[in-house]
Amino acid sequence: MTLTEYDISAITLTLQLAAVTTLLLMLIATPLAWWLTHTQTRWRAAVTALVALPLVLPPTVLGFYLLVLLGPRGIIGQWMQQLGLDTLPFTFGGLVVGSIIFSLPFAVQPITNAFAAIGARPIEVAATLRASQWDRFWSVAVPLARPGFITAAVLAFAHTVGEFGVVLMLGGNIPGETRVLSVAIYDHVEALEYTQAHLLSAGLVVFSFVVLLMLGRHSSQWQRVSA
Amino acid sequence: MNPPTLSLCLRFALLACLLPATAHAGQAHIAVASNFAAPMKKIAAQFEQATGHTLTLSTGATGKFYAQIKHGAPFDVFLAADAETPARLMREGDAVQSQTYAIGRLVLWSDRPGYIVGDDAVLRQNRFKRLAIANPKLAPYGAAAVEVLTQLKLIDAVQKKFVIGENIAQTYQFVASGNAELGFVALSQVIQDGRLAGGSVWVVPASFHTPIRQDAVLLKRGEHNDAARALFDYLKTPGTALTLIRSFGYER
């Protein structure tokens, strides 16, 4: 029982997708979480709900809308073509966009909670010590919110690895470009190749368990240190 | 008594008269391959009216149904998208009877009118960016598409442009949403009441690929189920079911 080239390419692609998605998500989620923690506008509730939407929507709904919106006849697709860019469905870039939207709440919520837990006090104290806004953010807020960032990154990565519905709709199952692990497993089951399906599925179960175990240990360690 | 109540009473009386005729009415669970979902809904309605039996339809992918049946899914009849899966169920003793209920026709379809001129020229010119096909490993229509391209000696030229749908429904969606300019789909997906519903099409000659046989099996669980047996016979008797199947772009 060994992994075929087909499976290895799916695993590599999945890890690449999860890594790129996590990196970009951290860049997007951090300012968004900061804004959500400190804004006073009445739009806050609406934006929070919008960010949480992928938690409750079936991934196939997201994937279908993205296929339509990003396609050559969708608003975004037409706009991209006017800029001389290729449309996103069936490309790695398209999967990254889909994964970012799909995993957004998993990155934004832990960071928002971490920022909120710091409270106004440390930031105010830093301000009285004449730290600039930028300095207050980088030297006070970010180090204090570190566990939130770690949780966000791990969850975003793991959630992207396990993604299926969005990539199925948006991907087109192209080897090395959009055929990720979950799609490969689905194909194996459909083709009655149960040995390969078991191998990959069991691998995914073990991976997910280890990730969550490490996350749990990490957060309990941190609580002990900070207590 | 006012007229509406009266007519309601009449209906009940009528129903009471009809009841003895449907006293043996049974119930059966049918698993249907997604590509045959639309015709099967109509066939089921006619069948229920003609026999008094009731059918519960579940639609899905053939491979998934196979796995579910092997693990005790409560289906009496299975209308598969291929001939292999039913044959396998027969071999493994999970099914007791088998028959071909439809033969699918492959078409090259674009949702742009005039894009395809009724032959393979558009493939030879090769000016498109993406060609949608169903996964040849899973879907008989996908395997047939690869056969056709191989026979036309175009496979190497167009292979890099493939976008692969998990099934024929998703493949259709890729083309219908404009994400792929054209794709190999089922005739049953693009015709309505015997006519092309939109876009442009090349109906691939049946001789270009192995026939896309869709077989149905009477499953072990439905062996002694009257409704299941009746449906199995209904599918093969010439008449309304056959006419319907043909009107949806299948042959037989």
Image (cartoon, helix red, strand yellow):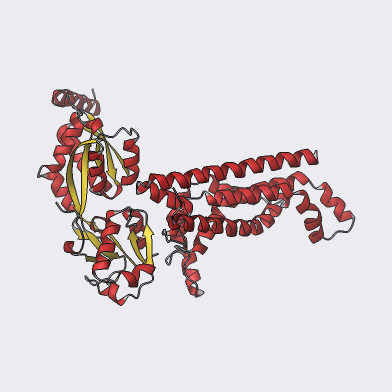
Judge from the rendering whether residue A79 lies leftward or rightward of residue A123; answer left or right: left
Q: Residue at x 41, y 49 (%)?
A: A186
Q: Quadrant of residue B96?
A: top left
Residue B19 position, x and y percent, is 16, 24
How many marks overall?
Answer: 0
Residue A82 position, x and y percent, is 49, 74
Work out whether residue A190 can be spotted.
yes
Judge from the rendering whether residue B16 lies leftward or rightward of residue A49; answer left or right: left
Q: Residue at x 60, y 43 (%)?
A: A210
Which residue appears farthest toward the left when viewing the image? B238
Judge from the rendering whether residue A146 lies leftward or rightward of residue B152; answer left or right: right
Q: Residue at x 50, y 72 (%)?
A: A85
Residue A101 position, x and y percent, is 55, 55
With respect to residue B171, does B94 lie above or below? above
Which residue appears farthest toward the front when viewing the image? A1
Residue A100 position, x and y percent, is 56, 56
User: Front-most of B82 and B18?
Assistant: B82
Work out whether residue A51 can be spotted.
no
Q: Quadrant of residue B249?
A: bottom left
| Image quadrant in which the C terminus of chain A is located | top right
User: Front-most of B175 and B15?
Assistant: B175
User: Front-most of A226 and B23?
Assistant: A226
